[in-house]
Amino acid sequence: MTKRFWNLIKISPVLVATTFLAANSALAAEVNEKVTNVAQLSEAQDSNNIGQVTSVSQFSDVQPTDWAFQALQSLVERYGCIAGYPNSTYRGNRALTRYEFAAGLNACLDRVNELIATATADLVSKQDLATLQRLQEEYSAELATLRGRVDGLEARTSELEANQFSTTTKLVGEAVFNVSQPFGGDRAVAAATNTSARTKLNSNTTFSDRVRLNLYSSFTGKDQLQIRLTAGNIVNNNTGTGATGTNMTRLGYDVGTADNSVSIDKINYAFNFSDAIRVKVDASGGELWENVNVFNSDFSSSGRGALSRYGRFSPIYRQGQNGAGLTVTLNPNEAISLTGAYLAQNTNGTTVNAFGANNPGLNNGLFNGDNTIFGQLSFKPNKAFNIGLTYAHTYLAGNSANNLFQSTGSAFANNPFGSTFNNGVSSNTKIESNNYGVEGTFQFSPKLALSGWGGYTTASTLTGAARNAEIWYYGATLALKDFGGEGNVLGIIFGQPPKVTGGNIRNVGTNRNLDRDTSYHLEGLYKYKLSDNIQITPGVLVIFNPENNNNNDTEYVGTLRTTFTF
């Protein structure tokens, strides 16, 4: 091919210039180079915006001393079938394939035919036409292949358009199969509970599931409407008389029901207000951990992350759970991100929250019921290190199910002012809390990452007897990536779930702080990538001194989770 090519160049400068043309205009028809980074993607996108030129002097990288200058000049001025990049460069030294050459040649042939049709054939010499004819014959096979490929793409596109689910919506699904068994000695009890009559923990093996179907719609290309359907029967390990007796053993993907009934549990719409501002409006099921960075990307997902509830991220992101509201994220540059949010809890499924933001008959609504005001500043000085400072102010309007951390940690830490622990304190006490957190992640190498969090909460009553509590917690995760194979992750998670460490909360009978001891959370898991769409995760969860009571037996939860994505 090389010898024939250079022999043809001797015939006419048209061939030389066509070679340069193909290096540019053919990119719009076919990009043969694999895009592996953002810079290449940007260059490929630029190549689709090649503009026609009227003078060779418009190319900043083409000089009169260049060996092909006259050929380029002839093609531009005589035929007008040459184009350049948007930044006024021609990039004449770029290598090209035979397909690209054929596409460029075809462009010139189309231009010649146009000139003939408009009675300007005198601009084309017989010698040039003979050359073009020889070129067309020489590359007839490539031109036919190119036309065939285009015809094939058009046929496939037509078929997809005729049979696709929607022109604006795509379906993304996840199915979790879970085999699990908690085991240990006696069920855990709170420190204030009479421990003389304990019951054995039920250690039966269970097999359960959770399925989620997400409908993602985009109307501008930079926005997203999400509607999620959920069904499942993975029961909370703390549910029932034979269970573990503590929420510390909860899995990160339990659904709280046992009938696999289908419900729409999440509706939201996100869009770009500008290049630096992202806005998300939650109508139902809003959760802070899905709206902001939680600094634990290897384990934050419920279906593909940590096995436990506590191991996914800091409890501060549980504030305002299942709410409606607004989240705004500002990214002025790659190093700094600032997020502000407001979420108010809704009536959720069949469990009626008497202070829901979506019930006008309860005299609470969006602003007077349970709500959270949230802010987070994250700083990423380099690709390896990222740190966040987080604050959340939460108001609980006196629901009997007051729950500071949405059942993460000890029962006392989640509702330190309930009648169970304070001998007659009203169950509808209004509560406010100020939550402070620091989170961070450090990427030692592409295959080793360390993440962690620490949090401090002050909570106080707004009605009834004046009470206050101080609560601490922390956690750390270690991820060994590509361990035993590409895409696999070996994880270790350790921490202290929320624990009441101070305040004037006292049991009337014992006059002592109820969370007198310390619970520890230890988790080991191995995320095995069976394929791009199937992940198998075996692991074990160990809770030392459950419910912050060292009189309780250590509890274990063995789990095998299989996650299908489609």
Image: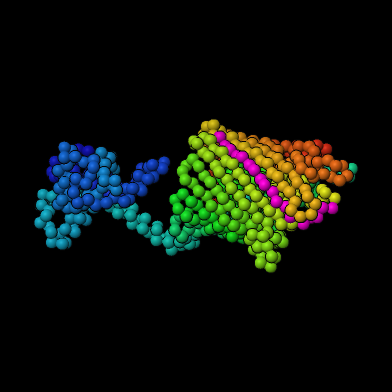
Q: Which residues are magenta?
A: 424-442
Query: Does the magenta-highlighted stretch encompass residue 522?
Result: no
Q: Is residue 143 left or right of residue 152?
A: left
Residue 436 shown in magenta: yes
Most foreground residue, 402 or 198: 402
Residue visible at 56% across and 38% down? 387
**Is 423 on the left-hand or right-hand side of 104?**
right
> In x, y percent, where is residue 189?
82, 44
Q: How is the image coloured?
A: rainbow
Q: Residue at x 68, y 53 (%)?
A: 395
Relative to 188, 63 lies left or right: left
Q: Position of residue 317 (x, y in %)?
A: 63, 47
Q: Nearer the viewer, residue 264 or 329?
A: 329
Query: Is 497 located above or below residue 79 in the figure?
Result: above
Q: Quadrant of residue 326?
A: bottom right
| Position in image of residue 137 (x %, y %) | 20, 50
Query: Looking at this view, is 563 or 282 the one in front?
Result: 282
Q: Residue furthest top?
A: 444
- Give the x, y percent position of residue 90: 25, 44
User: Which residue shows up at 67% across the image and 47% down it?
Assistant: 434
Q: Is residue 366 above or below residue 276?
A: below
Identify the main secondary structure in magenta.
strand
